[in-house]
Amino acid sequence: MNLDFPISLFLVALSSILGGLSYFVLKRFRKYPKYALLAEMFLMILVVGELMKEGFAVTGFVMLSLLAGMGLIYLIDRITRIRKINTTLERKLLREIPKAIALGSSFAIDNSLGIAIAILLFLHNIPKGGLLSEKKSFKDLITIQFVFIVIGIITYIFLANFNILAQSLIMTFAAGMLLFIVIEEGLLLKS
C-alpha cells in the first residue's frame, strides 16, 4: 500500500473535523450555512465530474454504473424515510459512505487520481464540517469520520486486486450516489 492513500484518507477525515471547529467561529454570520452548502455542492460536483471523466476513459458502461448508484441511494433514502430510520447521524453516515468508496476506489485505480479526489474532498469537507456541527454534537462528527476511514480502507483493499474495469464501475457507482446527494441538497437549498 502506497503511503499516499492512508495519509490522504486521514487528512480528508481531519478536514471535516476542522470544518466542524470553524463553525464555532463562523456561526455569527447569518448566511454561513447557505454559502457553506453552495461551496460544498460545487466541490462535490467537481469530484463527480473527475470520477466520471476517469471512468469514461476506461469504458462507456460507467453511465449505467452512475445511474445504478443514483438509484440505490434513492431507494435507501426512501426506505429510511418510510421506516423513520432518519436520525441525523444515520443520514450523515449514509452521505459519507459514497465519499469513502470514491476515495478508496480512485486510489485503487491510480495514485494521482486518488490525490486529486482527496484534495477536492478535503476542500469539500471544510464547509460541510461546519454544517454538520451546526445542529449536532462534535462527537457525531468524529464518529462519521471514523466510519469514513474504515470504509475507505475496506474499499481500497477490496479493489486493489480487481481489474481497472471493475474498479472504474465501483468508482462511478459511488459517483452516482454522490450526484444524487448533490441534487437532493440543491433541492433543499431552493426551498
Image: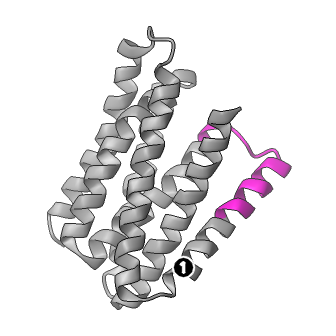
Q: Which one is in front, 164 or 133?
A: 164
Left or right of 11? Residue 98 is right
Question: What's the coloring here?
Answer: one colour
Q: Can residue 99 be seen at all in this image of the molecule?
A: yes
> Does 58 appear above or below 180?
below
The residue at the point 48 percent across, 44 percent down is 41
> Residue 191's spot in the image, x, y percent?
71, 32
Count of picture labels: 1
The spot of residue 22 in percent (x, y) is: 35, 22
The answer to whether residue 90 is visible is no
Asked if 129 appears above or below 73 in the picture, the reply is: above
Name the amino acid type tagged 1: Met
Q: Quadrant of the N terminus?
A: bottom left
Q: Is residue 41 magenta?
A: no
* Residue located at (50% from left, 17% from top): 31
Secondary structure of residue under mark 1: helix
Q: Which residues are magenta?
A: 73-90
Q: Residues within 10 Å of mark 1 (few under 14, many from 20)?
A: some
